[in-house]
Image (cartoon, rainbow, N blue to C red):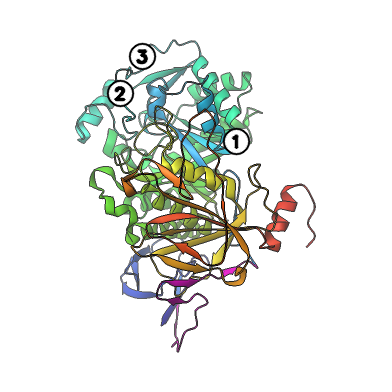
Amino acid sequence: MQILLICINDKWNLQRHLACPWFLHSLSHHELVFVNTCNRMVVLNTGLRGASVAFFFTLTIAIGATSVITSEGQRLTLSVDVTKSLHVTSRSYLSITISGGQLRKGLIGYDFSSEKLQNLAAELGPADVRIGGTYSDFLNFDPSSNEANCVDVSAQGGDYDYPETTIAPGAAADGNAKHDSFSSGQLDFTMSGKRWETLTKFCDQAGWDILWDFNLLDSRGEPWNPAKAKEFLEFSSSRGIKIPMLELGNEPNLYERKFGIDISAEKLVGDYETLRNVTAEMPQYAASGVYAPGVNNLDHFSSSRKYLTQFLQNRGCDVITEVALHHYYFQAEEAKTSDFTDLNVLEGLRDELEYAYNISWANCRLKKPIRFTETSTASGGGVPQVSNAYIAGFLWLDKLGLSATYGITRVFRQTFLKSSYALVTKTLKPNPDYYLSVLYKRLVEGPVFRVLDEGLSPQVRIYAHCVAKSKYYNYKDGAVVIYYLNIGDESSTLSLGEFLGAPVDLFILTPGDDKGLLSRKVKLNDQLLTMKTPELPALEPKSHTGDVTLAPKTFGFIVIPEADVQLCKDYHRYNDGVPVSC
């Protein structure tokens, strides 16, 4: 086995959380290309500011089996390092979005008086909610407006919603159509003060903290004028509306292609400095964080990597609270059903994360936290009948697990309600990913542990955390939760290693009907989950002792109540307000 160790200004570490060794593939004046034994590639731009590169090569030969996880056919032995945590996730780690497109349509489907809607939202709290997206760049705020120019889509039936990335219903996808729609003003709409108050009251009741996305395109490429933002914030302040997080625009690196407006990374930094100056003068929002630049898919587009690099190099590190990114595995129109359980697709997220941290660490004096402020399976509203089916859970659960091991602070799921990638349909039917998300919120929180995965079948992906405190389950503070996805076609038997013989609680999710992976329903421990009342059904575990069978094409959670992990006990004591000694 060959191991390549790389040190770049003591900031980059390509071996970080990777299971496969890396090899120097090629070297040019500007780029270094590395390929690993999983046939994945990372390209590093050596022209980044201050990058001095040193290489250290070590050749080792492994004789015999040395991995702490062994694979005997499909029998796997689990080993988790619970002596230290990779990172710590908060209770709001899994967050959600409400798209600007839904604001444009008058929030159809949001009956804020509905007990069922309120319960569906509250079960995802505490969380952050990003209210933004493509159409936020066309939103105008008028405290006294009657919103007469909202788009009327009331005649549209079913649970489908126009995707956030679609510029206008029925419009051609070519750039000229988008430019014309933008320049003519037909995309503009108005939100009234009354609607804003109603929406924010709903978010507050659900336990959602708001990330608000301001209109950036209003400047038409000139320096951003904060006058309208001031009016909005002054109105919000007078109503006591909390807005702890702020953004400017949506994917500004794509403005020139979509709308013919070029907002450079350097100019965007200046616009964020203007926003900072505005909030500094308003006591209620002076401490609000700002998140940028919101570029899309570093793993797919070199232009996104370039924009992020330029943004951070031009004072961006000093202006923003955290780096904001968007990520989708693929475009909806190009996706195949098999992509949702394809190992190479899942691993694409690792490339995104490596790019994000490498670029950030190379260009910021202090490490900047990173969050995904918009993410789902497929861009363009999701894949109809697939992104809202059981099969979408593999990508969603793996994104939550892998992102946590890298220290991502928030993962904002696009979107809460409506569209093909939503958690809930317009008629308030929870999609399978909704129940998966609720279980994640109830079970996972705090220290993230390293699963020692050498020798583990690549078709089985496993993550480990402390168990969250929840009113639904009375687990001890030292409890640990293991969650897994088996994307393979064969069962695996998981032996719990150091926890062997301990009683466990199983939360195993499987398709809910004969549609299999494309089922819009889901079973928990073989019990179909349905909302027959405004209340969620009970999400009860199944008691178990001994090895756990990981059935093919399934995912779930394994709670070890008696794990007695000290880091988990310390974490919960600290968060309960009890001092923890060193």
Q: Which residue is mark 2?
A: 157
Seen from the viewer's position, the closer of residues 291 and 30 is: 291
Q: Is residue 230 magenta?
A: no
Q: CA distance from mark 3 to mark 1?
A: 31 Å
Query: Which residue is found at the position 32% from the left and 33% from the top?
Result: 163
Q: Is there CB contact under 8 Å for labels 1 and 2?
A: no
- Relative to 440, is 175 above or below? above
Q: CA distance from mark 1 to mark 2?
A: 39 Å
Where's residue 423, x and y in %? 43, 38
Q: Amino acid at mark 3?
A: Asn
Q: Which residue is mark 3?
A: 149
- Local packing at callout 1 (Cα closer than 10 Å; few below 14, some 14-19, many 20+) is some
Q: Is there CB contact under 8 Å for labels 2 and 3?
A: no
Q: CA distance from mark 2 to mark 3?
A: 21 Å
Seen from the viewer's position, the closer of residues 268 and 495 is: 495
Q: Which residue is mark 1?
A: 288
Where's residue 579, x and y in %? 80, 53
Residues shaded magenta: 55-83
Give the SS element for disc 1.
loop
Q: Amino acid at mark 1?
A: Ser
Where's residue 104, x and y in %? 38, 23
- Tag nearer the camera, 2 or 3: 2
Query: Which badge, 1 or 2, comes first in the chain's sequence?
Result: 2
| Residue 288: quarter of image | top right
- Local packing at callout 3 (Cα closer than 10 Å; few below 14, some 14-19, many 20+) is some
On-image quarter of the N terminus: bottom left
Give the SS element for disc 2.
loop
Give the SS element for disc 3.
loop
Query: Which residue is found at the position 37% from the left and 19% from the top?
Result: 189
Seen from the viewer's position, the closer of residues 49 and 102 is: 102
Query: Which badge, 3 or 1, comes first in the chain's sequence?
Result: 3
